[in-house]
Image: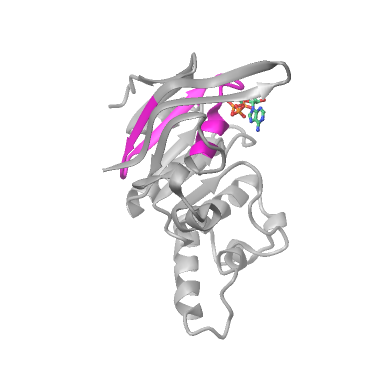
């Protein structure tokens, strides 16, 4: 089954007196469990594509189906998004004055019978992503940018989303750090069987993907992935 299926999509924005067309007659299909990377030039519509898949902006024409649902027919979009989609960007999504572990356990009261189970789960995810017991209990603000993004990824996997959308999450990282974080993200997605679509121009991560697309001329074109 397709996790994501776009058929004949047109997306455009009014830009003052002009219409800016981002996608035209665009088809895009992602099978459940696939790891897909999309790259593209500046302002080609990469973020808009992910926002459309997350039911944050509708197509002007065509159909967007995600996890079997036609998004135009969805009634409770924010609830549906929370239940099904993990959305990662390079902007902080966690509470900076809490620790990674506290961020993962947010909303679960310490006297809730499920707390111990969730605490153990949070610790296992954080350890698996390279945190120590010490670093998972430090305030987020005091951690490196790389660890802050890894904590965001940990939070995403706490909710077991069926679909993960990652919009250049490592844009601000330098050297190998971006690649290390994306490798961890892919490793976790494979382990959990999540479908993942990542916007990235990082050649190393493109090699690790099942499929690689370029966004150009208002279309997504599948490119050869050297590693496959
Ligand atoms: N809500 C909106 N209203 C009007 N125009 C918009 C809106 N959202 C996006 N656009 C326009 O669509 C174009 C593509 O934007 P988008 O952010 O999707 O591209 P991108 O490829 O992610 O950009 P970047 O290179 O910054 O990563 C931009 O020119 C932007 O101004």
Q: Residue at x 62, y 51 (%)?
A: 148
Q: Residue at x 36, y 49 (%)?
A: 194
Residue 198, x across and y down, in percent: 47, 36
Quarter occupied by the C terminus: top left
Q: Residue at x 31, y 44 (%)?
A: 32
The x, y position of residue 187, in whole percent, is 38, 46
Q: Quadrant of residue 43?
A: top right
Q: Nearer the viewer, residue 72 or 20?
A: 72
Residue situated in front as seen by the camera: 198 or 125: 198
Name the residue rendered at 58%, 48% in the picture: 149
Can residue 184 be seen from the camera position used here?
Answer: no
Give the image quadrant in which the ligand numbered 1 is located: top right
Q: Position of residue 179 (x, y in %)?
A: 50, 36
Residue 172 in view, yes or no: yes
Residue 48: say if magenta: yes
Depicted 49 relative to depicted 143: above or below:
above
Q: Residue 115, image x and y in percent?
A: 51, 79
- In the image, which residues are magenta? 27-52
Q: Quadrant of the N terminus?
A: top left
Q: Is residue 102 above or below residue 112?
A: above
Based on the picture, tell me whether residue 50 belongs to the magenta stretch.
yes
Q: Nearer the viewer, residue 33 or 9?
A: 9
Question: Which image quadrant for residue 141?
Answer: bottom right
């Amino acid at each position: 089954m397709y996790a994501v299926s776009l058929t004949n999509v047109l997306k455009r924005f009014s830009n003052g007196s002009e219409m800016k067309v981002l996608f035209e007659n665009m088809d895009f299909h992602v099978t459940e469990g696939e790891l897909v990377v999309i790259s593209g030039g500046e302002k080609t519509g990469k973020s808009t594509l992910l926002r459309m898949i997350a039911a944050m902006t509708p197509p002007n024409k065509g159909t967007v189906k995600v996890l079997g649902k036609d998004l135009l027919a969805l009634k409770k979009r924010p609830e549906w998004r929370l239940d099904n989609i993990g959305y990662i960007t390079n902007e902080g999504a966690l509470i900076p004055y809490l620790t990674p572990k506290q961020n993962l356990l947010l909303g679960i009261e310490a006297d809730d019978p499920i707390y111990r189970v969730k605490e153990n789960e949070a610790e296992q995810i954080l350890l698996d992503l390279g945190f120590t017991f010490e670093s998972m209990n430090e305030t987020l603000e005091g951690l490196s940018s790389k660890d802050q993004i890894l904590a965001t990824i940990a939070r995403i996997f706490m909710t077991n989303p069926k679909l993960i959308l990652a919009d250049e999450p490592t844009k601000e990282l330098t050297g190998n750090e971006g690649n290390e974080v994306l490798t961890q993200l892919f490793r976790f997605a494979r382990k959990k069987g999540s479908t993942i679509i990542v916007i990235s121009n990082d050649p190393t991560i493109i090699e690790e993907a099942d499929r690689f697309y370029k966004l150009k001329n208002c279309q997504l074109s599948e490119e050869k992935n050297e590693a496959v």
